[in-house]
Amino acid sequence: MIAVIAAWVVVVLHFAFAFAETVGWTQMARRFGYSKEQADTTRSLALNQGFYNAGLAAVLGWALATGHSATVIAMLAYVVAMAIVGAVSVRWTIFVIQGLPALIALGLALL
C-alpha cells in the first residue's frame, strides 16, 4: 500500500512539473535564474518537456489505477533514468526532486 502511495506522489509531482513547464514556464524559469530572454528562447522546449511529463504521469496513473504493476515498475524506472540524465546534464537537484521520489517508490514496489 505504501508503494502505491509513493507512486501516486510521483504522478502528482509530474503533473505539477507538466503544468509549470507548459503554462508557467516564464515565471518558473526566472525563479531558476534564467533571464527573460532565456525563458522566452526556451519556452518551446519547456512546452515539449511539459507534455512528456504529462504523458508520463498519465501512463503511470493509469497503470496504478488499473493494477498493471509491470507498467508501474517500468515507468518508475524511466523516471529514475531521466532524473539521472537531468542531474548530469542540467543540475543535480533534478535527481533529488524528480528521481528520489521515483526511486523510493520503485524500491517499495519491488519489495
Image (cartoon, rainbow, N blue to C red):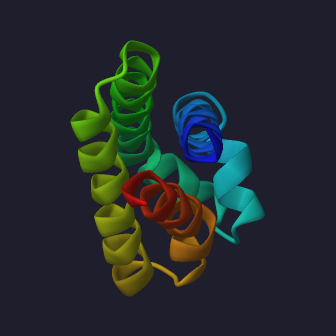
Q: Which of 13 and 7 is in front in this view?
A: 7
**Left or right of 106 on screen, residue 24:** right
Looking at the image, the residue that sits furthest to the top is: 66
Percent x, y of residue 95:
51, 74
**Left or right of 13 on screen, residue 41:** left
Percent x, y of residue 78:
28, 55
Percent x, y of residue 42:
43, 52
Quadrant in which residue 48 is drawn: top left
* 102 versus 70 height, above or below: below
**Residue shown at 43%/58% (left/top)?**
106
Q: Which of 10 and 86 is in front in this view?
A: 10
Quadrant of the snapshot with the C terminus: bottom left
**Residue shown at 54%/35% (left/top)?**
11
What is the count of numbered marks? 0
* 31 versus 47 height, above or below: below
* 29 versus 91 height, above or below: above
**Residue shown at 60%/74% (left/top)?**
96
Quadrant of the snapshot with the N terminus: top right
**Residue shown at 33%/25% (left/top)?**
59
Q: Nearer the viewer, residue 65 or 13?
A: 65
Quadrant in which residue 58 is drawn: top left
Percent x, y of residue 36:
65, 56
